[in-house]
Image: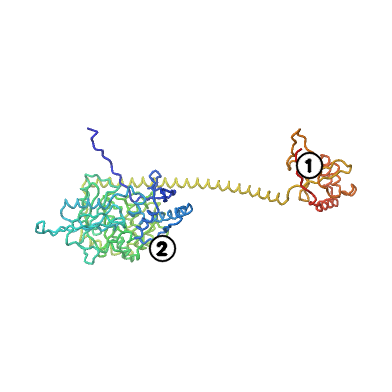
Amino acid sequence: MAIFEKRLEQKVVLDDTEPITCTIETAQNIDGHTEYVLRAQRGPYPENSWRILRRYNDFASLNKCLQISGIDLSFPGKKFIGNMRPDFIADRLIALQEFINQVLMNPILASSLPTKKFIDPDSYSTPFHDLALQYASMCLRTDGVYTLGQSLGPIGWRLRKHYFKVVHKPQGNKHSPGHSNTKHHLIKSSSQSHGKQHTTQVCVTTSTEKDYNTKESGKDDLILTWTEFGPDKYIDEKEIHNVLKNFGGVQHPFIAPIEYIASNDSGALVIRKFYKQGSLKDVLCAASPCNPFLSKYGSPKGRAPLPLKELALYARQILEAIRFLHSKGMACGHVHCGNVLIVDGVARLMDVENFIFGVPSFYRPFFVQHSKINTCEAIDVYGFGHLLYEMCMGYPLQDSYARQILDCPDSLKSLLESILSKDACKSVLPTLDQLAAHPFFSEYAASFNDQYAMAIAAQKPYLKFSTNAKEQLKNAVQKTENRVRDEQKSVKNQKRLVRVQEMMTSEEEKKKIKHKAKQEQRQAKLRAQNSLQLNNGPPQTVTVSASSGSAGAVMVKSDSANSIVSPHEAALMSPPPHATDSGGSASSPLPPPSAPPIPPPSSLPLFEQAAATGLGSSNGRQMVKSISGDDNSSSNRSALLESICNFNKSGLKKINISDN
């Protein structure tokens, strides 16, 4: 019946190299403690985001796990008193945001499991190490040749790749179960979290197992790697066993040989020889290969570039290995110093099978930013440029392109700029054949052709795929390139959207700035007017009696010597008189205080004579205007100003008028 049919759910495989951003939005008080609301986003699309709650102790635990790297991180200290004040919480939020930004901007710290579990606990809470141990044991049990040993811990940067010791099973006479040479040990494997240990696992080891870090370790020691299939795995389940079987027989003087390879539905394991000097990255950092990845490469004590002749020889050997793979219809996609071994002065490329496993490239966050790096050959050329840069400088390039290349010969500088310069990344990169013909190699690795001819004579290169395997590889190359192009388009569109938002934000900010400037200008004008009004003081009234003995005309006067206000204007400036309760008739005002004595009409200035005869009428105003404009009345004006200045204000009294 259909109701009982099993639903097949496709497993979603995450790309661990996809960058994650994290923003602390706010803080909230829950049950007497502060929790911070974090918004995380994977990739360029805001739809792929989520929110998580974290306390200060969670940040402190992350900082403790990352201290093994030796990288100096600015982490705020703990405070016991006053840690619930709003101003303190706001300052701490800013400090924690700076801390998480430093972690995510560092590629080594951002790729570590503690950081991933802190930001995305739903996706990275799976016991990856325990599952790898289980799958590897099952694969080796069916073969019966090798025995799984102790875990080597997080010595690599991939979260879904795990390293174990492995030895050959003893071949000899069979013993009874009670006298077997094989011993069962309880082994505590180190966790990827660098701080905790996994639960105890029962592993089968032999008494002949050696410590890989001791001096007795030799070339006969073996190392097993278990890798989960990645998002770029496009080979069918039915064909991947045949493809891996064909690739297991690869032979090339510059490719590390494979001792054993097997797979299941979840991933694959590969067994190779273990070399105590480690990878090329271990040589450059002077690090022990069995130390944790964070402690080896986080802040290495010693970094030393390679001499030019060694650099040119190793680079030319690696380039020849990449050319051989492409000639067989297979890409590499994982060219970096961690995948190169130096054995007896010969560079050997390893982990080439990662392309078949579909795991993302180490430099994927870099080359998805450049739309021209969209083929498998261009990706390998780009990775080769980063490898060459690290061998030359002694430290890796932490950006998608090199802004400036110094301290190297002109030929090497020309080679690096043809791959890693900004103009080169925006245009078409050189091909593998063009790189091999570069003058740098003929200048510093002139003996390569003779050495390569001798190496080919000793070990003929061999890699043969079946017809179906070739079709599967061709299909995988096309789909991998299509996924890269699609991701580059999304990154480009997101960059455009960000630029548009920045432009819109800048326009809005400009409008806000202009509006704010206008408001400040208006407020400045108002302040200036208020200050002038305060300096001039309130208006004053003076009663001037006419010579005919009629009622006195009221003249409004201010502190300014040149300002005289008419009674009509004074009425607008002063409040209206109070109305009576009976009929609305205005109450008669009290007589004003006595004014200074007025001189006789003959001695009055013309201006005052005009004011005394009729200041309130329009004719009086016209007379005042005509008299004040006469050039012959300058002495009269002086007398008027002198009388106004000598006026005694203390004689005026303020009288409250009450209603009848």
Determine the secondary structure under disc 2.
Answer: loop
Name the spot of residue 337 as percent of width and height, x first: 31, 59
Q: Amino acid at mark 2?
A: Leu
**Badge 1 density bin: few <14, some 14–19, many ≥20, Cα 10 Å:** some
Position of 526 with respect to 128 (left or right) is right
The colour mode here is: rainbow
Disc on the earlier residue, 2 or 1 = 2
Give how far apart the Cα atoms at labels 2 and 1 are: 87 Å
Q: Nearer the viewer, residue 513 or 261?
A: 513
Q: Quadrant of the N terminus?
A: top left
Q: Quadrant of residue 210?
A: bottom left
Rendered image: mark on residue 189: none
Q: Which sits in the foreground, 93 or 241? A: 93
Q: Quadrant of residue 200?
A: bottom left
Quadrant where the C terminus sits is top right
Q: In the figure, 80 relative to 30: above or below?
A: below
Which amino acid type corresponds to the residue marked 1 in the rendered image?
Answer: Pro
Q: Which mark is residue 567?
A: 1
Q: Which residue is mark 2?
A: 406
Picture quadrant of residue 585: top right
The kind of secondary structure element at disc 1 is helix
Between circles 2 and 1, the one closer to the viewer is 1
Q: Are marks 2 and 1 in contact (CB under 8 Å)?
A: no
The spot of residue 163 in percent (x, y) is: 25, 56
Asked if residue 419 can be seen in this view, the reply is: no
In the displayed structure, would residue 649 be above or below residue 552? below
